Amino acid sequence: MSVTLLQKSAALAVCLLLSVSLCLPAGAGELEPPAAPPAAAEPAPNPPEFLALSYTSSRDAIHRGEVSDLTVTLKDTALLTRDFRVEDYDFSKLIDSFSACTPGVEVLSAEDEPVTLRLTCAGVSYSGTGHSLKLSAARKGGGPAQTVEITVAQAVEYTPPVPTPKPEPTPTPAPKEQPAPAVVITRSALAAPLAANQAADIVVTFHNAGKTRVLTPQAVFTPSESLLLVSDTSTFLLPDIEPGKSQSVTVRVQAGKEIAAASQALAVELKYNYDNAGTLTAASAADKLNLAAVTTGDPAQKTDAATPNIVVRDFTYGQSNIAAGSRFTLDFRFQNMGRLRVENVVASVDGGENFALDGGTSTFYYDALPAKGEQKQSVPLQALPTAKSGAQAVTVQFKYEYVDGNKRTAASSEVRMAVPVVQQDRFQINAPALPESCTAGEECVLTLNYVNRGKTDVSNVEAAVEGDGFDAAAKTQYVGNITAGTSGSIGFALTPNQAGKVKVLLKVTYEDPNLQPQTKEFPVELTVGEEPLPDDLFPDDMPEKKPFPWPLLALIPLGGVIAGAVVMLRRGGKGKAADPVPAWEPWPDDETPGGPEE
């Protein structure tokens, strides 16, 4: 039994082998080796995944411009220390709130721990803006970089100081400019002409003809070549000279051994300061003082005569003051003060910057003028509209010749005359216009309109309101200086206290172009009405009076007729059948309309 089973198994195996061999194609017996699997691509390097664990700063507070050492601790939990090499990575600092640096890298972790690094930025300066510290980590050879940003709490941002505004100064009225004061220089007379080697004391006087004080005057003297100054110094410091006052100084001179000319001179220059609208301004005045001397030489030789001088004895201009822009005639009388006759006399009149000729010529010729002789001359002039107020100079220069023996000599002299000029007061103020209505307890306004039609400023203008029976927020107003050609208005807000006539006085004071105080007054009478009743005396929400309901009275009779008809119908229905039209019956004595039925 077992043998037969084995034989059957062997036969089945042979059949399977034959069927497999018949099914295989030709050459299938030779088996090809299996193909090699494709090579796996190298995985791309993973980007760093560092986390900032902590940081430290060498300063507790870092201000703008201060230097500090910053240390940051980083950790990559996906990377072991044994798989990390510092030289395979680039660590750098990005642009942030601190200056540039190259971080120092130090490994802190063990071989089998996640890599932990310490990055140090030494000596970085804080910019004063922000709190950011940015570090970059990248694997060498490619791959994305990682940015790690740390907020440095010790950084103190810079806040620029806020400037404290200065209080604006209170404006002050601008002072008026003043012209330089004119200084007239004179000397004392000599008893006789100076002889050789003779000394003499000369008193030189300085007179302030202006309206402003002469400050720190200093006189400098220069003698001619035949004179010597015997005084210790040629410069003299004088005290201040008030307007209309004088100061003198004594100068000692001595004639030389030889005197070539009979006319010697002592030149003097006065340098000083004056107050010009609050500004210290420098000015000067100069003159040449002629001194007679006796020439030296051959005794038989005739001594030259003294140089004749022509001076203005007096002058008039027809008025006490000359108004700017007006015309006038300047009459002056001049005289030959010498002992010799002068010839070919030419007189030239110069009005300077304040006067101009009003027709004619400024130069006059005279053939001769004897010793002690006089001559008169009239010159038409006009004060310019822009002339400065005060004493202004008109200069007359004389050029002439005189004959001393056989010698003809040319000479000249110059004389200045002071003519007072005043500027016209053309400051115009119009009378105020009265308001259309004015009520007690209510504000009304009075306005003064003004215009300066003059050529110069009007200074220190002040307006005031006076009177009783009213209140004013500002009873005095300071307007200040009003320049030429300027117009404006001054307003006063008044609140009358009661009804009736209220008298008000508006007063304006100022200094005219000649610095003289002026006052203009404007009396005003206001008619003040009663104060209006308050609005809540007659309220709008009072109930309206309703009219009497006259139409309802007409319904009363109609109701009585209807009630009577109803009663009649009811009474007729009780005795018999209702007639088509029941007869009218009077009301029983015991029945009333609307009463109870029987």
Image (spheres, grey):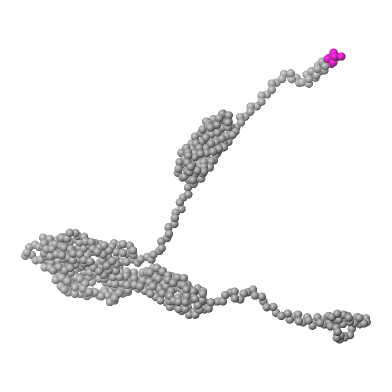
Q: Is residue 229 above or below residue 117?
A: below
Residue pictured at 54% horizontal, 40% vertical: 149
**Residue 51, quarter of the rendered image:** top right
The front one of 45 and 120 is 120
Image position, residue 27 (x, y; %): 74, 19
Is residue 427 found inside the magenta-colored segment of the image?
A: no
Residue pictured at 71% horizontal, 80% vertical: 548
Image position, residue 309 (x, y; %): 18, 69
Q: Which residues are magenta?
A: 1-8
Report if residue 144 is visible in the image.
no
Residue pictured at 29% horizontal, 76% vertical: 319
Give the mark count. Answer: 0
**Residue 83, quarter of the rendered image:** top right
Report if residue 507 is visible in the image.
yes
If the image is split into quadrants, where does the C terminus sit? Answer: bottom right
If the image is split into quadrants, where does the N terminus sit? Answer: top right
Is 487 left, or right, of 250 in this rendering? right
**Residue reaching furthest to the top:** 3
**Residue 296, quarter of the rendered image:** bottom left
The front one of 159 and 35 is 159
Is 8 left, or right, of 533 in this rendering? right
**Residue reaching furthest to the right:** 576
Is 171 left, or right, of 380 in this rendering? right
Residue pictured at 87% horizontal, 80% vertical: 597
Image position, residue 82 (x, y; %): 56, 28
Q: Is residue 413 above or below residue 94?
A: below
Q: Is residue 114 above or below residue 574?
A: above
User: What secondary structure characterizes most of the magenta part?
Assistant: helix
The front one of 39 and 514 is 514
